[in-house]
Amino acid sequence: MAKLILQSVLFQGKKQDILISGKKFAKVGRPLTERDWDKAEVVNCDGLAIVPPFYNGHTHAAMTLLRGYADDMPLQQWLTEYIWPFEAKLTAKDIEIGSRLAVLEMIKSGTVFFADMYWHREHTMKVVEEMGIRASIGVTIAENLGTSGRIEENMKFIRNHCHESERVKLVVMPHSIYLVGEKLFKRCAKVAHEEGLVLHTHLSETIKEVRDCKKQYGCTPVELLDRYGVLDDNLVAAHCVHLTQNDMSLMADAGSAAILNPCSNLKLGSGVPKINQMMDAGILLGIGTDGASSNNNLDMHEDMKLVSLLAKANGRADALPAGEVLNMATAHVAMAFNVPAGVISEGFLADALLLDLKNERLNPLHNLESNWVYAADSSAIHSVICNGKFVMRNRHVDGEEDIVKEANACALEIASR
Ligand SMILES: [Zn+2]
Protein backbone atom coordinates (compact mmCIF):
# COMPACT_ATOMS: atom_id res chain seq x y z
CA MET A 1 0.00 0.00 0.00
CA ALA A 2 1.32 3.45 -0.95
CA LYS A 3 2.61 5.46 2.01
CA LEU A 4 2.77 9.21 2.27
CA ILE A 5 4.36 11.10 5.17
CA LEU A 6 3.52 14.74 5.78
CA GLN A 7 6.69 15.77 7.59
CA SER A 8 6.71 18.60 10.14
CA VAL A 9 3.18 19.76 9.41
CA LEU A 10 1.53 22.07 11.96
CA PHE A 11 -1.37 20.21 13.60
CA GLN A 12 -3.09 21.12 16.86
CA GLY A 13 -0.46 23.68 17.76
CA LYS A 14 2.68 21.63 17.13
CA LYS A 15 4.76 20.27 14.28
CA GLN A 16 4.12 16.59 13.65
CA ASP A 17 4.79 13.84 11.12
CA ILE A 18 1.52 12.37 9.82
CA LEU A 19 1.39 9.02 8.04
CA ILE A 20 -1.15 8.31 5.32
CA SER A 21 -1.37 4.70 4.25
CA GLY A 22 -3.36 4.10 1.07
CA LYS A 23 -6.49 6.19 1.34
CA LYS A 24 -6.56 6.60 5.14
CA PHE A 25 -4.79 8.45 7.95
CA ALA A 26 -2.68 5.73 9.58
CA LYS A 27 -0.76 7.68 12.26
CA VAL A 28 -1.71 11.06 13.64
CA GLY A 29 -0.25 12.44 16.89
CA ARG A 30 2.03 9.43 17.50
CA PRO A 31 5.75 9.10 16.75
CA LEU A 32 6.54 7.29 13.50
CA THR A 33 8.74 4.20 13.58
CA GLU A 34 11.56 3.24 11.22
CA ARG A 35 9.15 0.88 9.51
CA ASP A 36 6.73 3.73 8.85
CA TRP A 37 9.46 5.74 7.09
CA ASP A 38 10.56 2.74 4.98
CA LYS A 39 9.58 3.23 1.30
CA ALA A 40 7.28 6.14 2.12
CA GLU A 41 6.97 9.24 -0.07
CA VAL A 42 7.99 12.08 2.24
CA VAL A 43 6.60 15.57 1.70
CA ASN A 44 8.33 18.37 3.58
CA CYS A 45 5.51 20.40 5.14
CA ASP A 46 7.63 22.96 6.94
CA GLY A 47 5.64 26.21 6.89
CA LEU A 48 2.34 24.41 6.27
CA ALA A 49 -0.59 23.58 8.58
CA ILE A 50 -3.09 20.77 8.08
CA VAL A 51 -6.87 21.27 8.44
CA PRO A 52 -9.88 19.27 7.19
CA PRO A 53 -11.09 20.16 3.69
CA PHE A 54 -14.61 21.30 2.84
CA TYR A 55 -17.55 19.02 2.01
CA ASN A 56 -20.18 20.88 0.01
CA GLY A 57 -23.59 19.63 1.15
CA HIS A 58 -25.66 20.95 -1.75
CA THR A 59 -24.83 22.25 -5.21
CA HIS A 60 -25.60 22.03 -8.91
CA ALA A 61 -22.08 21.76 -10.32
CA ALA A 62 -22.68 22.28 -14.04
CA MET A 63 -24.51 25.54 -13.37
CA THR A 64 -21.08 27.20 -13.31
CA LEU A 65 -21.83 27.74 -17.01
CA LEU A 66 -24.61 30.15 -15.94
CA ARG A 67 -22.42 32.16 -13.58
CA GLY A 68 -23.19 35.84 -14.09
CA TYR A 69 -25.73 35.13 -16.84
CA ALA A 70 -28.64 36.64 -14.89
CA ASP A 71 -28.55 38.43 -11.55
CA ASP A 72 -30.47 40.82 -9.33
CA MET A 73 -34.04 39.84 -10.08
CA PRO A 74 -36.79 37.93 -8.28
CA LEU A 75 -36.59 34.12 -8.27
CA GLN A 76 -39.56 33.49 -10.57
CA GLN A 77 -38.42 35.92 -13.29
CA TRP A 78 -34.83 34.69 -12.95
CA LEU A 79 -35.93 31.08 -13.49
CA THR A 80 -38.51 31.48 -16.24
CA GLU A 81 -36.85 34.16 -18.37
CA TYR A 82 -33.17 33.24 -18.02
CA ILE A 83 -32.22 30.03 -16.24
CA TRP A 84 -34.72 27.54 -17.70
CA PRO A 85 -34.35 28.74 -21.34
CA PHE A 86 -30.51 28.52 -21.00
CA GLU A 87 -30.71 25.09 -19.39
CA ALA A 88 -33.04 23.81 -22.12
CA LYS A 89 -30.13 24.23 -24.55
CA LEU A 90 -27.59 22.26 -22.50
CA THR A 91 -26.24 19.03 -23.98
CA ALA A 92 -24.51 16.19 -22.12
CA LYS A 93 -21.16 17.50 -23.39
CA ASP A 94 -21.93 21.01 -22.04
CA ILE A 95 -22.68 19.51 -18.64
CA GLU A 96 -19.39 17.66 -18.65
CA ILE A 97 -17.54 20.91 -19.44
CA GLY A 98 -19.47 22.85 -16.78
CA SER A 99 -18.85 20.14 -14.19
CA ARG A 100 -15.13 20.22 -14.94
CA LEU A 101 -15.00 23.97 -14.29
CA ALA A 102 -16.99 23.41 -11.08
CA VAL A 103 -14.67 20.68 -9.80
CA LEU A 104 -11.63 22.82 -10.61
CA GLU A 105 -13.13 25.73 -8.68
CA MET A 106 -13.99 23.44 -5.77
CA ILE A 107 -10.49 21.96 -5.57
CA LYS A 108 -8.89 25.40 -5.71
CA SER A 109 -11.12 26.59 -2.88
CA GLY A 110 -10.46 23.50 -0.74
CA THR A 111 -13.53 21.33 -1.37
CA VAL A 112 -13.09 17.56 -1.88
CA PHE A 113 -16.73 16.43 -1.83
CA PHE A 114 -20.02 17.74 -3.15
CA ALA A 115 -23.62 16.61 -3.18
CA ASP A 116 -24.90 17.39 -6.64
CA MET A 117 -28.22 17.64 -8.36
CA TYR A 118 -28.42 18.05 -12.10
CA TRP A 119 -29.08 16.30 -15.40
CA HIS A 120 -26.84 13.95 -17.45
CA ARG A 121 -25.34 12.89 -14.14
CA GLU A 122 -23.06 10.24 -15.68
CA HIS A 123 -20.98 13.04 -17.24
CA THR A 124 -20.51 14.75 -13.87
CA MET A 125 -19.61 11.38 -12.35
CA LYS A 126 -16.94 10.86 -15.03
CA VAL A 127 -15.41 14.28 -14.29
CA VAL A 128 -15.29 13.62 -10.53
CA GLU A 129 -13.60 10.26 -11.13
CA GLU A 130 -11.02 11.86 -13.42
CA MET A 131 -10.23 14.81 -11.16
CA GLY A 132 -9.79 12.73 -8.00
CA ILE A 133 -12.35 14.11 -5.56
CA ARG A 134 -15.58 12.67 -4.08
CA ALA A 135 -19.24 13.28 -4.79
CA SER A 136 -22.71 12.09 -3.98
CA ILE A 137 -24.43 12.55 -7.29
CA GLY A 138 -28.16 13.07 -7.18
CA VAL A 139 -30.43 11.16 -9.48
CA THR A 140 -33.07 13.82 -9.87
CA ILE A 141 -36.67 12.71 -9.70
CA ALA A 142 -39.32 15.26 -10.67
CA GLU A 143 -42.85 14.88 -11.96
CA ASN A 144 -43.65 18.35 -13.21
CA LEU A 145 -40.56 19.45 -15.12
CA GLY A 146 -41.40 17.70 -18.38
CA THR A 147 -39.21 14.84 -17.17
CA SER A 148 -41.90 12.42 -15.98
CA GLY A 149 -41.00 9.99 -18.73
CA ARG A 150 -37.53 9.65 -17.27
CA ILE A 151 -38.64 8.46 -13.84
CA GLU A 152 -38.48 4.73 -14.67
CA GLU A 153 -35.19 5.22 -16.47
CA ASN A 154 -33.80 7.05 -13.41
CA MET A 155 -34.99 4.38 -10.98
CA LYS A 156 -33.27 1.77 -13.15
CA PHE A 157 -30.09 3.86 -13.19
CA ILE A 158 -30.10 3.94 -9.38
CA ARG A 159 -30.47 0.13 -9.14
CA ASN A 160 -27.68 -0.47 -11.68
CA HIS A 161 -25.11 2.13 -10.65
CA CYS A 162 -25.47 2.74 -6.93
CA HIS A 163 -22.35 0.93 -5.77
CA GLU A 164 -20.16 1.56 -8.77
CA SER A 165 -17.29 3.62 -7.43
CA GLU A 166 -15.32 4.22 -4.28
CA ARG A 167 -15.33 8.03 -4.45
CA VAL A 168 -18.53 8.62 -6.39
CA LYS A 169 -21.83 7.52 -4.86
CA LEU A 170 -25.40 8.19 -5.84
CA VAL A 171 -28.11 9.90 -3.82
CA VAL A 172 -31.80 9.60 -4.54
CA MET A 173 -33.03 13.12 -5.10
CA PRO A 174 -36.74 13.81 -5.29
CA HIS A 175 -36.50 17.49 -6.30
CA SER A 176 -38.97 18.97 -3.77
CA ILE A 177 -42.45 18.55 -2.36
CA TYR A 178 -43.83 20.78 -5.14
CA LEU A 179 -42.37 18.68 -7.97
CA VAL A 180 -42.83 15.22 -6.43
CA GLY A 181 -46.14 13.90 -5.07
CA GLU A 182 -46.78 11.52 -2.16
CA LYS A 183 -46.62 8.22 -4.03
CA LEU A 184 -43.38 9.03 -5.83
CA PHE A 185 -41.74 10.57 -2.75
CA LYS A 186 -42.46 7.38 -0.79
CA ARG A 187 -41.08 5.28 -3.62
CA CYS A 188 -37.87 7.35 -3.68
CA ALA A 189 -37.43 6.85 0.09
CA LYS A 190 -38.01 3.10 -0.27
CA VAL A 191 -35.46 2.76 -3.08
CA ALA A 192 -32.94 4.82 -1.08
CA HIS A 193 -33.36 2.53 1.94
CA GLU A 194 -33.15 -0.64 -0.12
CA GLU A 195 -29.95 0.47 -1.86
CA GLY A 196 -28.34 2.08 1.20
CA LEU A 197 -28.37 5.55 -0.38
CA VAL A 198 -29.09 8.95 1.16
CA LEU A 199 -32.34 10.73 0.29
CA HIS A 200 -31.68 14.37 -0.60
CA THR A 201 -34.25 17.07 -1.39
CA HIS A 202 -34.90 20.83 -1.42
CA LEU A 203 -37.07 21.76 1.56
CA SER A 204 -38.77 24.95 2.79
CA GLU A 205 -36.58 27.15 0.59
CA THR A 206 -39.03 30.01 0.04
CA ILE A 207 -42.07 31.53 1.72
CA LYS A 208 -44.03 30.70 -1.45
CA GLU A 209 -43.24 26.99 -1.08
CA VAL A 210 -44.48 27.00 2.52
CA ARG A 211 -47.63 29.03 1.71
CA ASP A 212 -48.54 26.85 -1.29
CA CYS A 213 -48.00 23.71 0.79
CA LYS A 214 -50.24 24.97 3.59
CA LYS A 215 -52.92 25.88 1.05
CA GLN A 216 -52.78 22.51 -0.71
CA TYR A 217 -52.13 20.14 2.20
CA GLY A 218 -52.93 22.14 5.33
CA CYS A 219 -49.44 21.70 6.77
CA THR A 220 -45.81 22.83 6.34
CA PRO A 221 -43.43 21.04 3.92
CA VAL A 222 -41.61 19.36 6.85
CA GLU A 223 -44.91 18.18 8.34
CA LEU A 224 -45.85 16.86 4.91
CA LEU A 225 -42.69 14.74 4.70
CA ASP A 226 -43.41 13.50 8.21
CA ARG A 227 -46.90 12.56 7.08
CA TYR A 228 -45.40 10.69 4.12
CA GLY A 229 -43.22 8.76 6.59
CA VAL A 230 -39.97 9.83 4.88
CA LEU A 231 -38.67 12.15 7.59
CA ASP A 232 -35.91 10.02 9.14
CA ASP A 233 -32.15 9.87 9.66
CA ASN A 234 -31.63 9.00 5.99
CA LEU A 235 -32.97 12.39 4.84
CA VAL A 236 -30.67 15.33 4.09
CA ALA A 237 -32.67 18.46 3.27
CA ALA A 238 -31.18 21.50 1.54
CA HIS A 239 -32.07 25.10 2.44
CA CYS A 240 -34.60 24.76 5.32
CA VAL A 241 -34.94 28.56 5.45
CA HIS A 242 -38.51 28.79 6.68
CA LEU A 243 -38.89 26.23 9.47
CA THR A 244 -41.38 26.53 12.32
CA GLN A 245 -40.51 25.44 15.85
CA ASN A 246 -42.56 22.28 15.24
CA ASP A 247 -40.66 21.62 11.96
CA MET A 248 -37.39 21.85 13.87
CA SER A 249 -38.53 19.44 16.57
CA LEU A 250 -39.76 16.98 13.95
CA MET A 251 -36.46 17.09 12.05
CA ALA A 252 -34.36 16.81 15.21
CA ASP A 253 -36.41 13.88 16.58
CA ALA A 254 -36.23 12.11 13.22
CA GLY A 255 -32.45 12.66 12.93
CA SER A 256 -32.79 14.39 9.54
CA ALA A 257 -29.92 16.69 8.53
CA ALA A 258 -30.26 20.21 7.13
CA ILE A 259 -27.84 21.86 4.71
CA LEU A 260 -27.67 25.66 4.96
CA ASN A 261 -27.04 27.63 1.75
CA PRO A 262 -26.99 31.23 3.00
CA CYS A 263 -25.26 32.97 0.04
CA SER A 264 -27.80 31.63 -2.44
CA ASN A 265 -30.77 32.26 -0.12
CA LEU A 266 -29.71 35.86 0.45
CA LYS A 267 -28.93 36.56 -3.20
CA LEU A 268 -32.28 35.19 -4.37
CA GLY A 269 -34.05 37.09 -1.60
CA SER A 270 -35.39 33.84 -0.13
CA GLY A 271 -34.59 34.71 3.49
CA VAL A 272 -32.28 33.79 6.36
CA PRO A 273 -32.41 30.37 8.06
CA LYS A 274 -32.98 30.34 11.85
CA ILE A 275 -29.53 28.91 12.52
CA ASN A 276 -29.50 29.25 16.33
CA GLN A 277 -32.96 27.80 16.82
CA MET A 278 -32.09 24.90 14.49
CA MET A 279 -28.94 24.22 16.51
CA ASP A 280 -30.83 24.52 19.81
CA ALA A 281 -33.40 22.04 18.49
CA GLY A 282 -30.55 19.57 17.86
CA ILE A 283 -30.67 19.28 14.06
CA LEU A 284 -27.44 18.11 12.39
CA LEU A 285 -26.46 21.19 10.36
CA GLY A 286 -24.15 21.20 7.35
CA ILE A 287 -23.29 23.85 4.77
CA GLY A 288 -23.54 23.97 0.97
CA THR A 289 -23.03 26.60 -1.71
CA ASP A 290 -25.98 25.80 -4.00
CA GLY A 291 -25.26 26.42 -7.71
CA ALA A 292 -22.93 29.07 -9.10
CA SER A 293 -25.89 30.65 -10.89
CA SER A 294 -27.27 31.92 -7.57
CA ASN A 295 -24.22 32.13 -5.27
CA ASN A 296 -22.22 33.01 -7.59
CA ASN A 297 -19.30 30.76 -6.70
CA LEU A 298 -18.66 27.37 -5.08
CA ASP A 299 -16.40 28.67 -2.32
CA MET A 300 -17.39 26.93 0.91
CA HIS A 301 -15.22 29.28 2.93
CA GLU A 302 -17.52 32.20 2.09
CA ASP A 303 -20.68 30.30 3.08
CA MET A 304 -18.99 29.07 6.26
CA LYS A 305 -18.09 32.58 7.36
CA LEU A 306 -21.55 33.83 6.44
CA VAL A 307 -23.25 31.09 8.52
CA SER A 308 -21.13 32.13 11.50
CA LEU A 309 -21.96 35.82 11.07
CA LEU A 310 -25.69 35.18 10.58
CA ALA A 311 -25.75 33.13 13.78
CA LYS A 312 -24.22 36.10 15.61
CA ALA A 313 -26.64 38.64 14.18
CA ASN A 314 -29.22 39.99 16.62
CA GLY A 315 -26.84 40.30 19.53
CA ARG A 316 -25.47 36.78 19.94
CA ALA A 317 -21.72 37.34 19.51
CA ASP A 318 -20.99 34.11 21.40
CA ALA A 319 -23.05 31.96 19.02
CA LEU A 320 -21.33 29.45 16.76
CA PRO A 321 -17.58 29.79 17.49
CA ALA A 322 -15.01 29.19 14.74
CA GLY A 323 -14.46 25.50 15.52
CA GLU A 324 -18.18 24.72 15.44
CA VAL A 325 -18.88 26.40 12.12
CA LEU A 326 -15.80 24.69 10.66
CA ASN A 327 -17.33 21.36 11.70
CA MET A 328 -20.52 22.29 9.88
CA ALA A 329 -18.59 22.84 6.65
CA THR A 330 -16.52 19.68 7.05
CA ALA A 331 -17.34 16.72 9.33
CA HIS A 332 -21.10 17.36 9.58
CA VAL A 333 -21.61 17.20 5.82
CA ALA A 334 -19.42 14.11 5.55
CA MET A 335 -21.47 12.50 8.32
CA ALA A 336 -24.79 13.43 6.70
CA PHE A 337 -23.72 11.74 3.46
CA ASN A 338 -22.12 8.72 5.19
CA VAL A 339 -18.54 9.50 4.15
CA PRO A 340 -16.09 8.49 6.94
CA ALA A 341 -14.06 11.68 6.53
CA GLY A 342 -13.84 15.34 7.54
CA VAL A 343 -11.59 14.77 10.56
CA ILE A 344 -7.77 14.58 10.64
CA SER A 345 -7.70 11.41 12.68
CA GLU A 346 -6.53 7.82 12.41
CA GLY A 347 -8.88 5.54 10.50
CA PHE A 348 -10.60 8.38 8.66
CA LEU A 349 -10.25 8.86 4.91
CA ALA A 350 -7.14 10.92 4.19
CA ASP A 351 -8.65 14.18 2.95
CA ALA A 352 -6.90 17.41 3.97
CA LEU A 353 -5.88 20.94 3.16
CA LEU A 354 -2.35 22.19 3.65
CA LEU A 355 -2.46 25.89 4.52
CA ASP A 356 0.42 28.21 3.70
CA LEU A 357 1.48 29.77 7.01
CA LYS A 358 3.21 32.59 5.10
CA ASN A 359 -0.18 33.81 3.84
CA GLU A 360 -0.80 37.32 5.19
CA ARG A 361 -4.29 36.45 6.42
CA LEU A 362 -2.96 33.67 8.64
CA ASN A 363 -0.67 36.11 10.49
CA PRO A 364 -0.05 36.89 13.27
CA LEU A 365 -0.66 33.35 14.45
CA HIS A 366 -2.48 33.84 17.76
CA ASN A 367 -5.05 31.23 16.76
CA LEU A 368 -4.93 29.24 13.52
CA GLU A 369 -8.58 28.13 13.66
CA SER A 370 -9.76 31.71 14.13
CA ASN A 371 -7.53 32.97 11.31
CA TRP A 372 -8.67 30.21 8.97
CA VAL A 373 -12.41 30.75 9.61
CA TYR A 374 -12.67 34.51 10.11
CA ALA A 375 -9.71 36.05 8.28
CA ALA A 376 -8.46 33.86 5.46
CA ASP A 377 -9.77 32.92 2.04
CA SER A 378 -8.86 30.21 -0.45
CA SER A 379 -5.59 31.98 -1.35
CA ALA A 380 -4.20 30.48 1.89
CA ILE A 381 -4.66 26.93 0.57
CA HIS A 382 -1.31 25.58 -0.61
CA SER A 383 -2.33 22.00 -1.44
CA VAL A 384 -5.36 19.70 -1.36
CA ILE A 385 -5.31 15.97 -0.58
CA CYS A 386 -8.23 13.63 -1.30
CA ASN A 387 -8.23 9.87 -0.64
CA GLY A 388 -4.52 9.97 0.19
CA LYS A 389 -3.53 11.70 -3.06
CA PHE A 390 -2.69 15.30 -3.99
CA VAL A 391 -5.36 16.83 -6.25
CA MET A 392 -3.77 20.29 -5.98
CA ARG A 393 -0.11 20.87 -5.23
CA ASN A 394 1.34 24.31 -4.60
CA ARG A 395 -1.91 25.84 -5.98
CA HIS A 396 -1.62 23.97 -9.29
CA VAL A 397 -4.25 21.60 -10.69
CA ASP A 398 -3.41 19.60 -13.82
CA GLY A 399 -4.98 21.05 -16.97
CA GLU A 400 -6.55 24.06 -15.24
CA GLU A 401 -5.86 26.60 -18.04
CA ASP A 402 -7.58 24.36 -20.62
CA ILE A 403 -10.56 23.71 -18.34
CA VAL A 404 -11.23 27.44 -17.93
CA LYS A 405 -10.74 28.17 -21.63
CA GLU A 406 -13.06 25.37 -22.72
CA ALA A 407 -15.81 26.36 -20.24
CA ASN A 408 -15.72 29.98 -21.32
CA ALA A 409 -16.00 29.12 -25.02
CA CYS A 410 -18.78 26.62 -24.30
CA ALA A 411 -20.89 29.06 -22.22
CA LEU A 412 -20.62 31.87 -24.78
CA GLU A 413 -21.57 29.46 -27.57
CA ILE A 414 -24.64 28.23 -25.64
CA ALA A 415 -25.77 31.82 -25.06
CA SER A 416 -25.65 32.46 -28.82
CA ARG A 417 -27.53 29.25 -29.78
ZN1 LIG B 1 -30.61 23.33 -5.08
Image (cartoon, helix red, strand yellow):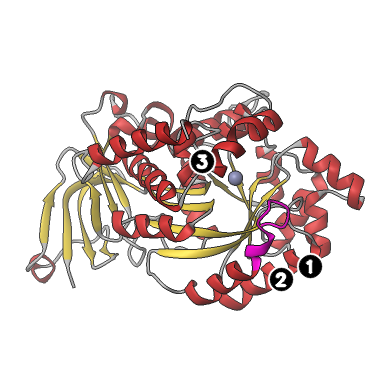
Residue 216 location (% of width, % of height): 90, 49
Residue 138 falls in image quadrant? bottom right
Residue depicted at x 70% and y 39%: 241
Tell me whether circle 1 and circle 2 mark residues in contact (CB < 8 Å): yes
User: 402 or 134: which is nearer to us?
Assistant: 402
Residue 265, visible in the rendered structure? yes
Mark 3 packing: few (<14 Cα in 10 Å), some, or many (20+)? many
Judge: label 3 CB < 8 Å from ligand 1: no
**In this figure, which residue is indicated by the disc labeled 3?**
325
- Of labels 1 and 3, earlier in sequence is 1
Q: Which mark is residue 183?
A: 1
Please state if 386 lies on the left or on the right of 328 as rendered: left
Residue 194 location (% of width, % of height): 61, 78
Residue 290, visible in the rendered structure? no
User: Which range is magenta?
Assistant: 142-151
Mark 1 packing: few (<14 Cα in 10 Å), some, or many (20+)? few
Amino acid found under the numbered disc labelled 3? Val
Q: CA distance from mark 1 to mark 3?
A: 37 Å
Residue 267 location (% of width, % of height): 60, 27
Quadrant location, the N terminus: bottom left
Residue 124 falls in image quadrant? bottom left
Q: CA distance from mark 1 to mark 2?
A: 6 Å
Amino acid found under the numbered disc labelled 2? Arg
| Quadrant containing ligand 1 | top right
**In this figure, which residue is indicated by the disc labeled 2?**
187
Q: Secondary structure at mark 3?
A: helix
Q: Which is in the foreground here, disc 1 or disc 3?
A: 1
Q: Is residue 364 above or below residue 215?
A: above
Q: Secondary structure at mark 1?
A: helix
